[in-house]
Amino acid sequence: MRELRLLPAFAMVWAVLLWGPWVLLAAPLAWRWSRGQVVLMATAGLAAVLRDVPAPESYVGTVVSSGKVLEVARPGAVDALFTDERFPDGTRVVVEHGVITAHAPPEGWWAFAGAVKEHFRAKVAAHTGAAGQNLIPAMVLGDTELQSHSELYADTGLSHLSAVSGSNISIVTTTVFVAARLLGAGPKLQVGLALSAMAFFVGLVGPEPSVLRASVTGLVGLAAVANSARMQPAHALCLGGIFLLLYRPDLATNFGFALSMAATAGLIALFPALYRMLAPLRLPDVVTRALAVAMAADIATLPLVAAMTGRVSLVSVLANVLVAPAAPPLTVLGLASVALPGPVLNLVEPFAWWIHTVAVTLDGLPLTTVAAAPATVVLVYGWIVAGLAWRPRATVGIVAVVLVAASVDSRTVLTVPTDEDIPAHPAAEKIVVLEKGPAHDYPSVTKDGIPVEYPHRR
């Protein structure tokens, strides 16, 4: 269990940033078992306290992410600002009492990265259809300007493929490693080229939480390779997590970072056991591996998704197994198409079409997502894993029957508490919204033409 020796320190840093310095009082409880761990936990926790610096009333910062929440980097931290304004990444802004009062356009590398994204976006719009425009810029460069179906991918468990994620870092570095080895490069040069490719890619994409996590763990792994050492994945993950939380304390409350860490931990801890449990099914090895990977990530992340949204996807494992062959070639060919002429995108579009088609098809099922609490998710998946260990074929059969039964049990009337609870593509002939408020003077329908009634509005 030596690979877990940094886990207590990692947990301490995260807990201190979430709940405050008083968590340090728990460190002495481990004195009886390991005095070294007490010193390490206390040191890491104290470092987290010193790094958690509150934002001044006025400062100059740089926009590092301009999604639903504007993230502005200042010396020593990154702050989240809620504003309706959109600014390109790299924009210099003046923040006073949480409000942006002035701004200047991006310069230097930020301007170059923005120009690359804008050029690629225009090229994708000119040479691909709706599926390509939704996925290719997002998966290749993290550019979601052309994306109009983000809820579709979230409902089917493919949101990590609708933007750049940690898997992209793995694909990029692995591709460069393999290419360098085939060209006869030595180990040191292979590491150098992989590191350069990773740095260039992260610079273009921007500091997304999952990309930062994958970058740091990738750096740890590359350092181990360069020194001909073996780095345990769990050790690299904890070391990377500690570094990132000390570098950016705001990540402690970022769901994207938590999901990325959980998914990686799930793959490390659960994949080997799930692969062995699924082996008696005698499926092709590539299918068994894809299924084990999807289940491991699903088990680790669904409780967090349930806590964040109150709903979980019933088709996420199937969706990820179906799109697994398409993601790597889309990423590699997509990155190549950034620098190559537009017609090269014709080779990329079929992979984007397949991923988009899987998402649309599965989202069209009557029961794609269900309301669930984190404890419910843990309990249900616990029984599934226990069944796989005891009777794998019977368990898979029971799960399949339940999912098929749920998909054909189409309700003609869907009742929801509020407008926000209406799914993207509801399988219903009528929707009833229970919230109160003023009555509409016009008929209400969804984008799919399904009538919506508000019986409690007067």
Image: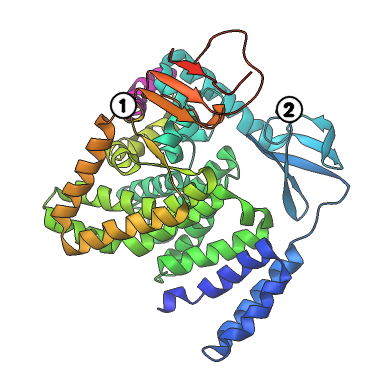
Give the number of callouts: 2
Q: Position of residue 209 (x, y in %)?
A: 57, 48
Which is more foreground, mark 2 or mark 1?
A: 1
User: Residue visible at 27% across and 53% down?
Assistant: 292
Q: Quadrant of the N terminus?
A: bottom left
- Residue 74: x and y in percent read 77, 48
Q: Residue at x 27, y 32 (%)?
A: 407
> Along the line of sight, which residue is nearer the eye, 399 or 143?
399
Residue depicted at 47% across the width and 13% down the height: 126
From the top left corner, tell me how far across and down residue 188 is, in percent. 44, 60
Horizontal side of 179 relative to 20 (left or right) equals left
Which callout, 2 or 1, points at the residue further toward the start of the chain? 2
Instruction: Name the kind of residue labelled 2 in the image.
Output: Glu
Bin the neighbour count of mark 1 within 10 Å (Cα to Cα): few under 14, some 14-19, many 20 and up.
few
Residue plotted at (72% across, 70% down): 21
Magenta span of residues? 342-360
Q: Amino acid at mark 1?
A: Thr
Viewer-side residue, 192 vs 75:
75
Task: Give the image location of residue 432, x and y in percent.
Answer: 48, 23
Q: Is residue 324 shown above or below 182?
A: above
Q: Mark 1 = which residue?
A: 361
